[in-house]
Amino acid sequence: MTSDLSRLFRPRAIAVIGGGVWGANVIATCRKMGFDGRLMAVHPTRGEIAGVPAVRRVADLPVAPDAAFVAVNRAAAIEAIEELGRRGAGGAVCFASGFAEADAETGDGAALQARLLAVAGRMPILGPNCYGFINALDRAALWPDQHGLVPVERGVALVGQSSNMLINLTMQRRGLPISHVVAAGNQAQLGLAAIGRALLADDRVTALGLHIEGLGDPSAFEALARAARAVGKPVVALKVGASAEAQTATLSHTASLVGSAAGAAALFARLGVAQVHDLASFLEALKLAHGLGRLPAASLASMSCSGGEASLMADMAAARGIAFPALTEGQRARLREVLGPKVALSNPLDYHTYIWGDTEAMAETFAAMLAGPAALGCLIVDYPRADRCDASAWAPVIEAAARARAASACPLALLATLPENMPEEIAAEAFARGLVPLAGLAEALDAIAALARAGGAPEAPAPAFAPPEPAGGRVTLSEAEAKAALADHGLAVPAGRRAASAAQAREAAEALGFPVVLKAEGIAHKTEAGAVRLGLTSGAEVEAAARAMGAGSFLVERMVEGAVAELVLGITRDPAHGFLLTIGAGGQLAELLADTATLIVPAGRAEILAALSRLRIWRLLAGWRGAPAGNIEAVADAALALQDFVIAAEGRVVEAEINPLIVTPERAVAADALVVRIESEGEGADG
C-alpha cells in the first residue's frame, strides 16, 4: 500500500460510485461545504446523480478521480475498487459493510476483505464499513450524512473507527476548530496510525485527536507518536474498550490486575500521547493542543473575581495533581500596586471586583499573574445568557486578557466553570486573540492534567518489546525452577532447597537455619490452598507441617525478615501493546488493593522509580511514621532483572511474576515467583 495519501485526503476530483441516497448525499455535502473541484458520478443505468452527469463505468470517467466514494453493496464494491485501481484513482472510501467485521455472521466476510485488499493493491482505501472523511480546510466531504463542520483555515484533525461518534463530535459547540474528520471503519488497509501521520503532515493541522476502539499495531502507533513529536503537534487519545485476550491468563495476580486498558495507558504515557477518559475532556484537550501545542507542566496561575471560584479551582485542581506556584516578590509588588491593600495576594487569586470593567487595571493584573513560574494562566470568566442578559460589561475581559497574553511568554486560557457559559462566538474571538477558551471546570482541568502528563514524556522512548509469539505449548515452571532462572538474571531469592518428603523437608530446614518457610509444590495460589507455612522454627514443626499438607514435594526456604513492605512485580504479554511491566502493592492483598502502575517493556530505572513514587504504598516504602525505609534502588534492580529475563527469552516467556517481593531496608527479595513460558515440542523446562 502506498504511503502517499495526499490525493485521497486533498482531492480536486471526486467521483461517487452508485446511486441511492448515500451517493446523492455525498454530492450534496460537497456542495454544502463549498467544494470547488470536479464532481463526477458512475451508475450503470442512471444518467445523473443529484444533478451530476453519470457515466456507466469507472473507465468512462473523464479523469481519474483523486478520491471516490463507493456507495454500492460489498460484492459490487470489490469490482468498483478494482476498476478504480486500474483507472489510476488516488484512493477510495468503501462504505459497504459485511466484510471482516461481520465474518461471524456472514461466514465469508474475511474472505471478501482479503479479496478487497488484493484488488486495491497500492491504492489507498478507507474502511470498509465507514462513512469516509471531511476535509474542512479544502472543503471536500466524502461523507454521506449530516455533520457540524464549517470551513476553517487551520484546526485539529479527528480520527476514529465509529462514524456515529465522529458525527457527534462534529456537533460540538465548544469553539474547537476542526480541520478533518476521518472514519477508519474496520481498518482493513489504512489504520488510525497511518491516517494520523498523513493528516499531521499538513501544516494547517495543529493537533490530532484519536477516538480508539482497538489500537492495532503498537509499532505503527509508535511511529505516529514520533512523527507528531517531530512536527511539534500533540496527539490526544480517548481509548474505549478492553482486550479480553489480555486477561485470559489467570495464574498470576498480575494477569488479573492488568488488561488492555492499562496497556494502552502505559503506551500513551511512554509516547507522550495525552489520554483522556470522556468526550468533553477530549474536546477541551484538543482546544489546548490547538492553542498551545505542548504544555510542559501541570502548574497554573489562576485568576477570578470570586473567592468561591478560587477555592473551587484550588480543590478540583489539587485532586488532579495540578499545582499553583507561589507568587514571587515581583508578582506581589505589581499586584499590590494595582489591586490596593484590601486584596489578599495568592495563587489562585481572587482579584475582587474593584477593577472590573477597568481594562488597564485588569490587563496589568493578568500580566502580573502570568509573570511567574506557572506553565499556564487561567482566567475564570463565565458569560451571562445572551437571551436574558446583557454581556456588554464582559467586553473588557477579552481585551485585557489579550493584552496580558501579548506581553507575556506564558499562555492564557479563558475558563468558564460551566460549559454553557462559554458561548461559541466568544470562544472563536478568544482563539483569534491568542487565548484558549475552555468550557467546564472539570473537563478543562482534566485536559490540562492530560496535556501536562504528555508534555513530560521522554523525548526518545525505546521501542516497545513486542516480538511475535512463537509456536509451542505453554508450560508453568515450578517455583524453584522459576527462581533459579530469575536468579541467573540478577534477582535476589531466598536460600532454599527442594524436598521429596516430609523427612527431607526437615533435613533441608535444619541445613538452612531457622526460621523457614515451607511450601507445597505444584499449587498456583498457595496461601488460599493452605499450602504455605511461614515462620517455622524447628525441624519437628517443619516435618509436621509437611505431613499435614500431604503434597508430593516441597520447597523449603530461609524466611526473609525485616520486611518494610510487600510488592508485586509482574510482566505479561498484552496482545494489543506488547509486554507490560506492573509494579504495585503485593502479597495476599494484591488484587484487593489494586495499587499498581503499569509500564511498557522495556522500562528504564527512572521510569520504574517514578512509577513507585505514584503508588499509595510508597509511603510505607519511604518510611511511614518514623519506621525504616525500604531499599528503593533494590526494588528497581529487581524490576530490571525481571525485565531482562523476559527480554532475553525473546517472546517465549509470556508471563512472569514475583509476589511478594519482600522489601527490607537492605534488599528486595523474591519470596515467590511464577514463570509461564512457551516450549516447542521436545524442549525441556531448561530449554
Image (cartoon, grey):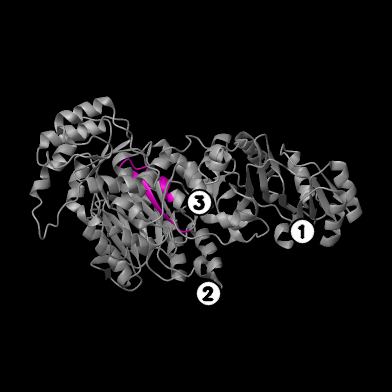
- CB-based contact (under 8 Å), mark 1 and mark 3: no
Mark carried by residue 155:
none
Q: Viewer-proximal residue, 154 or 670?
A: 670
Looking at the image, residue 206 sits to the left or right of residue 577; the answer is left
Q: CA distance from mark 3 to mark 2?
A: 29 Å
Q: Quadrant of residue 399?
A: top left
Q: CA distance from mark 2 to mark 1?
A: 47 Å
Q: Viewer-proximal residue, 617 or 232?
A: 617
Question: Which residue does the numbered mark 1 point to in the structure image?
Answer: 531
Tell me the residue at 36%/71% (across/down).
Answer: 44
Identity, as a three-letter code, of the amino acid under mark 1: Ala
Mark carried by residue 264:
3
- CB-based contact (under 8 Å), mark 3 and mark 2: no
Q: From what the image shows, is residue 458 above or below residue 23?
A: above
Mark carried by residue 105:
2
Q: Which residues are magenta?
A: 195-213
Identity, as a three-letter code, of the amino acid under mark 2: Glu
Q: Secondary structure at mark 2?
A: helix
Of badges 3 and 2, the one in the foreground is: 3
Q: CA distance from mark 1 to mark 3?
A: 36 Å
| Circle 2 Cα neighbour tier, 10 Å, few/some/many (<14 / 14–19 / ≥20) | few
Q: Viewer-proximal residue, 119 or 264?
A: 264
> Is 539 contained in the magenta span?
no
| Circle 3 Cα neighbour tier, 10 Å, few/some/many (<14 / 14–19 / ≥20) | many
Identity, as a three-letter code, of the amino acid under mark 3: Ala
Q: Secondary structure at mark 3?
A: helix
